[in-house]
Amino acid sequence: MGLLVKGSFLLLFLLGLPVMIAIGIPSIVYLLTQGFPIDMLAQRMHYALDSYTLVAVPVFIFAGNLMNSTGITRRIFKFADTLVGRVPGGLAQVNIFASLIFSGMSGAALADVGGLGKIEIKAMRDKGFSKEFSGAVTCASATVGPIFPPSIPLVIYGSVASVSIVKLLLAGILPAVIAVILMMVTTVFIAFIKKLPRAERWPTLRAIGNDFMSGLPALLAPALLVVGMLTGVFTPTEAASGTVIYILLISVFIYRDFSFEHLIDSALATLKSSAAILVIIATASLFGWILAVEQIPQMFTQFIIPFGENRIVFLIIINLILLIVGMFLDSTTATLLVIPILAPPAVAMGIDPVHLGIIAIFNLMLGLVTPPMGLSLFMISEIAECPITRVFKSVFVYFIPLGITLIMITFFPQVSLWLPGLVK
């Protein structure tokens, strides 16, 4: 029966139904046909959301919306442009750096591409970059943010896999930085080959200083977040709330450009995003419970272990599964549906669940830009108003740095586990 429920979900999803309906209908049918009371539906969904960890989800989203609406994102973007605008690649380098800081905040990778991506692509187009390259850089760089704190995808993974959120967020820092450095180096080579536009002259120290002082309070927000969690001063949920308070304080007392309208707009945007994510979490939790009752994870464990008695082979299999799933599903949905099935055999093979979390989220992000079904590519094509085949061609070169990063994350666990190991 469990396999039938799973097959029904895939059929409904392929027919184009919203994820919540594609998950919900088979789940309700299962409860009714198996004799479970219908109030079990509400109980399981309520139980899924009754989590202190998940409080961080809407709060982090609210922090990201506040940073955008009050102009903090723009100030950081401007400082980065002043600092590296003359470097080969110019604004493309700024795009990569900005995605590192901001693209994990909404909790939905496609929302990040649609929101921050519009700002980045417009800025690059205004500086003379081609449509396809602007879209390619935005698409590739968006894969990195969701493993760098603050990261809603990692928070959701932690709640599903019952793993320390602090350790997960810390685990993503070094892999994200490595990926960004490799992409920036790649962009330098592309810049020399294609003669990409950049600033005509190096900025003066005065210009750098002015933009740095203007952006410093904003730049401190993610820094304080990371340091606070690393030192154990606060939990991720407390960190999210502290970030919101900090953003409000610098907007009101330092930048003095905060208005009540900013607060209302940010709150409404947060309500929409949070509601969509949490409804999926609640519905997927019911679906996951059904799979657990039908012992689907155990069946999958027994099926896959004989193919992966070699640890390296097993890790390759895990990567391929996650990459393919990421091509079709957003990170939130994919995490909720796939991780409960993949985690048991992975743990049985001795893989650290924190390490698995970074592998999983990075693969899911990479799947969104992988031809032929990468969902981010289709969205970027619309935003950049460029044929998807041209975006494919331009983004392909970035699979080199992203692929190298994935290999390092997968086969060198300490890349992910070194920083979490510093926390007791």
Image: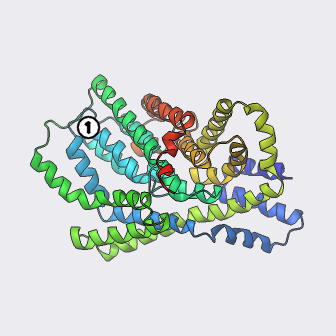
Asked which colour scheme the image uses, the reply is rainbow
Residue at (82, 58) in percent of width and height: 293
* Callout 1 amino acid: Gly
For the residue pair 46 and 312, the one nearer the viewer reads as 312
Residue at (34, 35) in percent of width and height: 184
Q: Quadrant of residue 156?
A: bottom right
> In the image, residue 126 lies at what x, y percent?
26, 43
Position of 21 relative to 197 (above/below): below
Residue at (36, 38) in percent of width and height: 134
* In this rendering, position of residue 120 left or right of residue 86: right
* Numbered disc 1: secondary structure: loop
For the residue pair 281 and 246, the one nearer the viewer reads as 246
> In the image, residue 181 lies at what x, y percent?
37, 37
Q: Is disc 1 surrounded by few (<14), some (14 to 19) or many (20+) residues within 10 Å?
A: many
Question: Residue placed farthest to the top in the image?
Answer: 193
For the residue pair 79 and 385, the one nearer the viewer reads as 79
> In the image, residue 211 lies at what x, y percent?
18, 53
Residue at (63, 71) in percent of width and height: 50
Q: Which residue is mark 1?
A: 90
> In the image, residue 16 lies at what x, y percent?
66, 50
Q: Quadrant of residue 252?
A: bottom left
Q: Quadrant of residue 390?
A: top left
Is residue 256 visible in the rendered image? The answer is no
Is residue 328 visible in the rendered image? The answer is yes
Q: What is the count of numbered marks?
A: 1
